[in-house]
Image: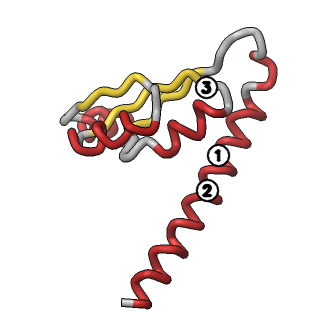
Amino acid sequence: MGGELLKDRYISRRIDIVRKILIGELMRINKGESRKQPKILDIGCGSGQFLRLAEELGFECYGIDVSEAAIAEAAKVTKAKLIREEKIHLIARKQI
């Protein structure tokens, strides 16, 4: 049991690092657009943690997920516009 907890904490820290790097890059890219509120779409938004972080940085946020439970969890932590869509994988496949 202790090994699983340690693994979960390690994964959680890595996810946090990736999120911070991504947000930093988004802010760097958007520097020249200071007159407009930047927008972000999180496909597969899960529990909404990334959207919450993006909101704190001033982004107008949108989230989409296949899971009704995930959308409900995201709604607890973010004011982002959220939708549930079962066919996300079809959209992604068309782009590949």
Disc 1 element: helix
Residues at circles 1 and 2 in contact by the CB criterion of under 8 Å: yes
Q: Residue at x 40, y 41 (%)?
A: 45
Q: Amino acid at mark 3?
A: Phe
Q: Residue furthest bottom?
A: 2
Q: Residue furthest front?
A: 76
Q: Position of residue 62 (x, y in %)?
A: 44, 26
Which quadrant, please, contains the N terminus?
A: bottom left
- Location of mark 1 (residue): 22
Disc 2 element: helix
- Location of mark 3 (residue): 59
Q: Residue at x 59, y 40 (%)?
A: 53
The front one of 95 and 83 is: 83
Residue 18: mark in rendering: 2
Separation of residues labelled 3 and 1 (CA atoms): 13 Å
Residue 43: mark in rendering: none
Q: Position of residue 48 (x, y in %)?
A: 43, 41
Q: Amino acid at mark 2?
A: Val
Can residue 93 be seen in this snapshot? no
Can residue 58 be seen in this snapshot? yes
